[in-house]
Structures are given as structure tokens and as C-alpha cells.
Amino acid sequence: MSDQIRVRFAPSPTGFLHVGGARTALFNWLFARHSGGKFILRIEDTDRERSKPEYEEAILRDMRWLGLDWDEGPLVGGDKAPYFQTQRASIYSQQMEKLLSQGNAYHCFCTTEELNADREAQVAAGKIYRYSGKCARLNPDEVRWKIEKGEAFAIRLRVQEGTTTFSDIVRGQVTVNHHEIDDLVLVRRGGEPTYNFVAVVDDALMEISHVIRGDDHLPNTPKQILIYKALGFKIPQFAHIPLILGEDRTPLSKRHGASSVSEFTRQGYLPETMMNYLALLGWSFDGKTEIFSKDDLIKRFSLDRIVKSAAAFDYEKLQWLNGHYLRLLDDEKMFQLCRDYLLENKIISIDRVKNDEAYLRRVIVLVRGNLKLISQVGEQVVYILNDTYPFDSAALAKFKVRENAVIFEKVIEVLKEADSLTAAPLEEKFRNAATQLGKKFGELVHPMRLAITGRTSSPNLFEIMEILGKERCLDRFQGFLKLILKG
RNA sequence: GGCCUCAUCGUCUAACGGUUAGGACGGAUGGUUCUCAGCCAUUAAAUCGGGGUUCGAUUCCCCGUGGGGCUACCA
């Protein structure tokens, strides 16, 4: 037995990786990496109906995307294998034998109907339901007889009177009276072990030193401690981290918008954004630093800086952070991300990418300044990649007026004379044109921008014109002029 | 209902029992610029309520209120 730090993330593959789960995984991972310990991934797939292989794959994929690599678990193995609960049945029954032979657990022959009736009766009488403990008092001969007779049974933990106190790293001391804990079921009639039992057996056998998990498990902890004790295992340290809430302070779910890691991926958030943001939800280093690289986080992370109260997920701040990390990307990486996004969403064809890669790269470099999400790239490039594009109707009403005809006539004239469309000299020409017209530069640029882009805001207009080339610019200005003259 | 737990600006958070209660996102205002984005500057905005303890409570204790979790032969 070493006192090495070993932590685990144990998702059940009944859905995609939720941001709450992702943060739990992150805190475990950071703690392991910070302390030179091991990070273990275990798949809790005992819920056979709801567990699906595709969810399992998706979880692994999202973990990798976030940069959370595991030292033991699926795909990589490890000497505490297997890491799938469905493959550990013999381990559970072995541990169960131990409990039974020690008398720490007992067979319970009560049927579901009996239990339900009992519960209803007690609730109707205004009492708090507790298991009667009937089968706990069966003598060994009766038990043997019933088993031989073929009566189905569950197995319950024999819980003694008393209290259990443990010290949670984030919550401090928590005490629970055993009155609150029933003789909980460890194995269902039918032989399937329950969550509390398998979690303890797995954590103990995998030598998990710190159980870091969502605080929805806080009330489970005393029960689990009782199981650890009954099994004679060393009790790990616990750290219960608060849940993540939506903007309305109810638990975060799909109806709040994106709530699974894959959705954020799809919308064009960067893994470094997610890691940084998730770390800041429920943890802080000094209350001032906001930007943390992966290495910073590993260096700085500690369990004692985890906050006790639940945090609301703030999409605005996430977006701000993503803008920050997007600005840090080099042009090539930015190009790749945008290209992949445009392809995946069929905004651009694969042929066009193949033929015009260099051009597309220039376009991305031009518009990247306005992106906070990769998924915004589509609307940023419409008017460059296409010759039909939407017009801002309010701006159209404002600029499509007869008085502007003179502006466009001049613009067209200047443009026709230009032999090269390099942005800087081109801008110079139009500054002169504005002066000649007796207009301020802005008064010239705004209508031009609308004609060229269909909108009132864009990157530098002359760089756009340079990218579009003379012909396309001329077409757009002439088209717009025609529109004006038509009235 | 019972038990557990949490509570600082709208949001994320900081503050050995002594601070003008700090930072960030978002907001507002101004600057830079052809617009947007960005960047810079300025600014508004909080200790849930009530009792204690203390010379002094955001901080410690109790009660209340509100939120969350658990109360399964779900995980």
C-alpha cells in the first residue's frame, strides 16, 4: 500500500459529458497532475438500460478534447483493471461473500410489494419511513431454509446505532445519525449490486485516495463510509464540489442552452477556453487572476481553494474568454478551425477549399478579429465567399437615397482608375475622393460598406475590397447605384 | 415531511475578527478608429433578515428566510 495520490472520474455512459461532469473530471485531473498522482477513469455502466456504447465513446472523446488524459482506464488499461463495472461482477460477489460471512450484511426476503405497503402505511401514519429490519432478525437456519426453497432475496447492510462523522475537504465536518440511514440494499433481488456498494468496492480496490465528486453525493458518503468499514477498507478523503447552476440558479440542463461539452465544441469554443472557464467555476487562485493556461492550472490548483457555494454558468463570460483564446491562435490554426467548421456545416464545399485554400486563408485572417466563436465565421464570410448576401434593411433604407448617387458615381470612377487594389493606397484614393466631394471620410465609407458587405459593420473596408478584387467591387457599387437610381 | 448543505455587486469570485469590501464578465460613459471587434480610461453595482459573542463582525454562534441535494432493490 502506497500513500500515492489516486483519484478517479467515474461517469456513467447514459448521456453525453455534461459540463458539471467535465468540471468534476477537471478538478480530479488537476489535483492528480498537481500532486504527481494518478488520474483514473472508470466507467459505471451498471445501468444496463440507459448505458450506451456511443455515449461511452462520446465521453472519452470529450475528455480527450478537453485535454484530460487518464493514467488508467478504458483504452489504456492499468493494474486495477477492469475499469468497467459490468466486468467486475465477480469482484463484487467476492466482497459480498466477505460481508455476509462476517455478518455485516444479511439476506432480505421482503418483496417489493411488502416494502411498498409498509412504506405507505408509515407515511399515512405520518411517520418517517424506515425499513422494519425484519429480515435482520432472521436466524441462520431460517435464512438457509428460505434460500434453499428458492426465495428471492436482496442483501442489506447491517447498520448499527450511532453516528458517522467525516471531514470533507471542502465542506468541513459532516455528521449524520445512523437513524437517517436505513439498512441499505447492497445487492438487489436478482443479484445486481447497487451503486453505493460497487462504488465503494471499486474505489477501495483501485486504491483511490481522494474522492472528488459532485455534492449530490454528500448524503451518500456516510452510507459509503459504513460500507468501507464493514469491508475493512481504508476510508479515502472526500471533497464534494458544488453543482453548476443555470442562469436562473436551477441545476444546469439542456433548457439553459448548451450543457454538454460536445455542444460547446460544436459551437466553436476552444478546449483551452472550456478548461479555463470550468476551473473558474467553483475555484479561484487569488481572486484576481482570470486567465490560466493548462500548465498554470496544474501549478496553482488546490482543493482548499474550492468554493462551497454553487455557481451559475455564465455564457457571456465564457464567450469573452473564448474571444481571448481565439485572439491568441496563430493564423494557421485559426484557418484550420474555421475551414473545418465551414465544411462541417456545408457553408463551403470541399472542392472550393481544395481549389481556393490560399484565398480562404486570407479571408479568415481578415475576418478573425470579429470572432468570439468559431461558429460565427459563417456570417462573417458570406459577402466575401458569395456574390449574393443579405442586406441590413434599416441601413439600406438609410443609404439607398438619391443624394448618394453622386457618391457612388465618384466611387466607381475612382475604382475604375485604380490599377491595383492594395488596401493602403486604395484607402488614400478614397480619402482624396471624399475631400473632392466635400464629404467626411466616414460619409463616404459607410455607404460603400453597405454596398460591399450588406451591413454596417465589418473589418477594414479596403482590405475587404482588396480581397474581393476590382471586378466584384465594381459590380457591387454599380449594382447599388442602379438600385438608387431605380428609387 | 425528515436529514444534509449553501448564502458578498446581475454573474464568477477575493478579503489572519479591524480594508474607502478588491478583481473579472456584463452594463454605462469617454478615448483610439471608416464601422464592428479589440485596446485604454472612468463609472454605477454586493456582505439575505433577526438576534447574540466581541472594543470591533462579510468573517464566529443561534434562529429565520431562500436555494440546492438526499431521502430507491437509479447512478
Image (tube, grey):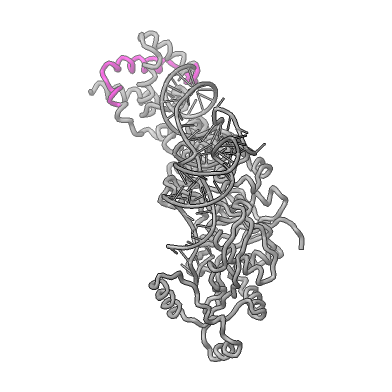
The answer to whether residue A350 of the structure is visible from this angle is: no
Relative to A83, residue A67 above or below: above
Left or right side of A417 for A35: right
Counting from the top left corner in percent of width and height, residue A111 is at 47, 81
Residue sticking out furthest to the right: A2
Relative to A372, residue A214 above or below: below
The answer to whether residue A99 of the structure is visible from this angle is: yes
Query: Is A399 or B57 nearer to us in this picture?
Result: B57
Mark count: 0
Q: Going 71% across and 53% down the picture, which residue do you hit?
A: A37
Q: Quadrant of residue A468?
A: top left
Query: Is A373 or A449 nearer to us in this picture?
Result: A373
Q: Going 60% across and 47% down the picture, which residue do you hit?
A: A306
Query: Is A428 or B33 nearer to us in this picture?
Result: B33
Q: Going 42% across and 15% down the picture, which residue do you hit?
A: A430
Give the dominant element type of the magenta stretch: helix, strand or loop: helix
Query: Is A96 or B67 nearer to us in this picture?
Result: B67
Q: Going 39% across and 73% down the picture, which residue do you hit?
A: A125
Residue sticking out furthest to the left: A487
Question: Is residue A481 located in the magenta-colored stretch of the structure?
Answer: no
Counting from the top left corner in percent of width and height, residue A467 is at 47, 27
Counting from the top left corner in percent of width and height, residue B48 is at 46, 41
Q: Which portion, as a residue range, is magenta?
A: A396-424
Question: Is residue A397 located in the magenta-colored stretch of the structure?
Answer: yes
- Looking at the rendered image, the quarter that the N terminus of chain A falls into is bottom right
- Looking at the rendered image, the quarter that the C terminus of chain A falls into is top left
Counting from the top left corner in percent of width and height, residue A392 is at 33, 30
Relative to A252, residue A365 above or below: above
